[in-house]
Image (cartoon, rainbow, N blue to C red):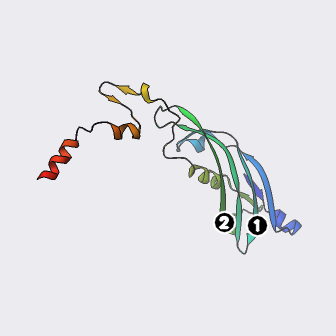
Amino acid sequence: MIIDLSEFMNSQSETITFEKTVVFTDSYLKNSEIKNIEPVTVKGECHLEEDTVVVSGIITEKMQIEDAISLKNIDYPFSFEFEEFLDENLINDEKMLDITDILWQNIVLEVPLKQTEVTDFSEYQGDGWKLVTEEESKNTNNPFGELVNMWGEE
């Protein structure tokens, strides 16, 4: 996403507001936990503070990530605010500022460590094991419970 900073010089405006849609290519997805991402809506503003360009706004959309239990791709909606302080030396000769990489870095920070849509754990079992909820694990007999008691006796 490119912001034209020449508006600061031409109109003597203190703030540039923008609302744009950003499409991230597959090269961004390659080294991330994100499997797919819809075109992202970015609403925000840009202003100067001495030698610093401040870009802030809101990013909203949904991404597809891997379910922590079923390993299927699931939709994960996100919406968050961001604020970046950029040195003026990041601006090129045409007074343009490309913030696509900055937006991507902020989106990657929003990826949850674990996310699941699984509510029925009964299909996740095998020979001698089954997936249980935390509540069920507290109610079952712990085969090592006797060892804990024996440890305390010594």
Q: Is residue 22 above or below residue 123?
A: below
Q: Position of residue 124 (x, y in %)?
A: 41, 28
Residue drawn at (77%, 49%), measured in percent from left and top? 20
> What's the residue at 35%, 41% (across, down)?
138
Mark 1 Cα within 10 Å, few/some/many (few <14, many 20+)? Answer: some
Q: Image quarter for residue 29?
A: top right
Q: Position of residue 31 (x, y in %)?
A: 52, 44
What number is the disc on residue 12?
none
**Of 132 and 59, which appears nearest the observer?**
132
- Residue 151 on image: x %, y %: 16, 50
Residue 123 location, quadrant: top left
The residue closer to the viewer here, 76 or 23, is: 76
Callout 2 crowding tier (Cα within 10 Å): few <14, some 14–19, many ≥20: some
Q: Amino acid at mark 2?
A: Leu
Amino acid type, mark 1: His
Who comes first in sequence, dot 1 or dot 2?
1
| Circles 1 and 2: CB atoms closer than 8 Å | no
Specify whether 135 is left or right of 90.
left
Q: Which mark is residue 47?
A: 1
Q: Which residue is mark 2?
A: 86
| Residue nearest the viewer, comparing 78 with 36 | 78
| Numbered disc in front, either 1 or 2 | 1
